[in-house]
Amino acid sequence: MDPLRSAEWYEGTDRNAYIHRAWMRRGLPDSAFRGRPQIAIANTASELVPCNAHLDEVAQSVKHGVYEAGGIPLNLPVTAPGETLVKPTAMLWRNMTAMAAEEMLRANPVDGVVLLGGCDKTIPALLMAAASVDLPAVVVPGGPMLTGTFRGEALGCGTDVWRLSEEVRAGTLSETDFLKSESATIRSKGHCNTMGTASTMALVAEALGMVPPGLAGTPAPDARLLEAAHATGALAVDLVAADRRPSTFLTKAAFHNAIVALAAIGGSTNAVVHLLAIAGRLGIDLTVDDFDRIGADVPLLVNLRPAGRYLMDDLHRAGGFAAVLREVRDLLDPDALTVTGKPLVSYLDDARIWDEDVIAPRSRPLQDAAGITVLRGDLAPGGAIIKPAAASPHLLQHRGRALVFDSIEDFRDRVDDPDLDVDAGSVLILRGCGPRGYPGMPEVANLPLPKKLLAQGVRDMVRICDGRMSGTAYGTVVLHVTPEAAAGGPLALVRTGDVVILDVPNRRLDLDVPAGDFASRTPGRATTDGYAKPVRGWERLYVDHVTQADTGADLDFLQGSSGAEVHRESH
């Protein structure tokens, strides 16, 4: 085996080697610094990130596995943006988390890393960091929570919050009963139990090959998660010995498999922007159109909310992710490897479906074609996406009059006005919510419906936005409109009353307005006043350098890989 990277810090008799060893010794034996791989545990645990609060316990199991295999485990706290708490949006700090993790892995005497994430942005950020620094790396997802119940019914966190809150606004559920459900929604440690972004990214990370096969989707309270974490710690030591870096198996074929998996599980639209960002760190030519080309005709097999009925612990008991992949094995790239060095498809032979209500067999899919659809046209020259599996079929071809909102504040001020000029056929448009405009591309695109329409029994409308929506959300929502309004996109020029044409089967999103009229327009004052204008700090850096959704909303100077080399000493 080649000399360990950490030997550059610890070997020798000079002053710098002395300092590096002495300050790290603290009871460790001499052997800790002689030929033993130093394995960082990039740990996003935080009590302000509820979905990741249990990761310190997971880290302990990883440590035991690392030490048992002959390595030295080192806890490395990583700043984590929590989806449910931080304002204005956790997406604003995904790139900061990725940058900080990358820099600390590069700067320290680390030979390999175990990445611990759970909440929506943490696994994507850690994968971006690992791709850029390209040290041997493996992911342990924190796992979903167990299902809570209320009035005898299972609750899906996120999805049922949106549903129940709309029922309150419609007058069909009392506020008292709504609030009673609050303590039942979050039953245990772990991330969302729906097929939201956290669950999606854990499963997609396994499809990419970054998670040991069979681990993703294990519930957070399940003892088998700790057992797998122990084994992953040992695997990290093996990765260093084999010099198996992310760049050796995160290929275009791996991303092909991730897109197939995304469609088959009915995963979150947020995976699109995250996978594009990860690919950008690796220099892989992945485009938004690949999601349509590869995934649009993949059948939906997983009956989980928001597109279905069940929840993540049901998926686990019904056969898990491997059972899903086995059903679409013919659509997977057989050459794509995993972190173990073996092909992903080699782990599928023994997979079985134990509950066909939860995981549908390929012969009886829930939907024949359920992948992400990419739309282009007058309103989205750079593309926009929609998730047909979560949409109303009758709205996938629709022509309606635009009702435009210039900011989320404008929307909230007016949506429940009884005099609002809106009907069920209207198209709700919210702009100023892209990466630059908000800033950070928040999950506001699944707009609540006007109260007057809810009272009439309307439960879905066409909605268009340059932002994102929660992976737990549902509805006929066109997302990630590119370029965003704040970057000069045509969404900034739409006026209330313009006729919008949505044609999902033909991949079109257009405006029925004379070309000359549209070309002569300029954004109104209310529109531009709604854009973010930070003057300092991370928000200023972000707005000045963030790219658009179609390239992953990464920072322009972070795209590509920088490697693990450090060329100067600290003393």
Image (cartoon, rainbow, N blue to C red):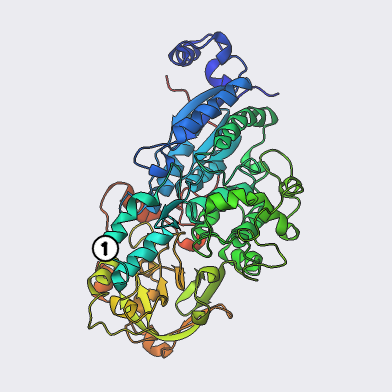
Depth check: give the residue in front, 96 or 336: 336
Up-down relation of residue 209 to residue 413 (above or below) = above
Query: Residue placed at 50% from the left, 25% from the top?
Result: 74
Given the current orientation, which residue lies at the most extreme front position?
A: 152
Query: Residue placed at 53% from the left, 58% from the top?
Result: 310
In the rendered image, which quarter contains the N terminus?
A: top right
Which kind of residue does numbered mark 1 sit on? Glu
Q: Position of residue 385 (x, y in %)?
A: 51, 69
112 with respect to 95 (left or right): right
Up-down relation of residue 368 to residue 345 (above or below) = below
- Residue 522 visible? The answer is no
Q: Position of residue 427 (x, y in %)?
A: 39, 80
Depth check: give the residue in front, 196 or 126: 196
- Residue 548 visible? The answer is yes
Q: Position of residue 397 (x, y in %)?
A: 52, 83
365 with respect to 21 (left or right): right
Query: Residue placed at 36% from the left, 82% from the top?
Result: 402
Q: Quadrant of residue 2?
A: top right
Number of marks drawn: 1
- Secondary structure at badge 1 equals helix
Depth check: give the residue in front, 268 or 131: 268
Q: Position of residue 140 (x, y in %)?
A: 55, 39
* Residue picked out by circle 1: 175
In the rendered image, which quarter contains the C terminus?
A: top left
Up-down relation of residue 69 to residue 127 (above or below) = above
Query: Residue placed at 35% from the left, 72% from the top?
Result: 430
Label 1 packing within 10 angstroms: few (<14), some (14-19), many (20+) = some
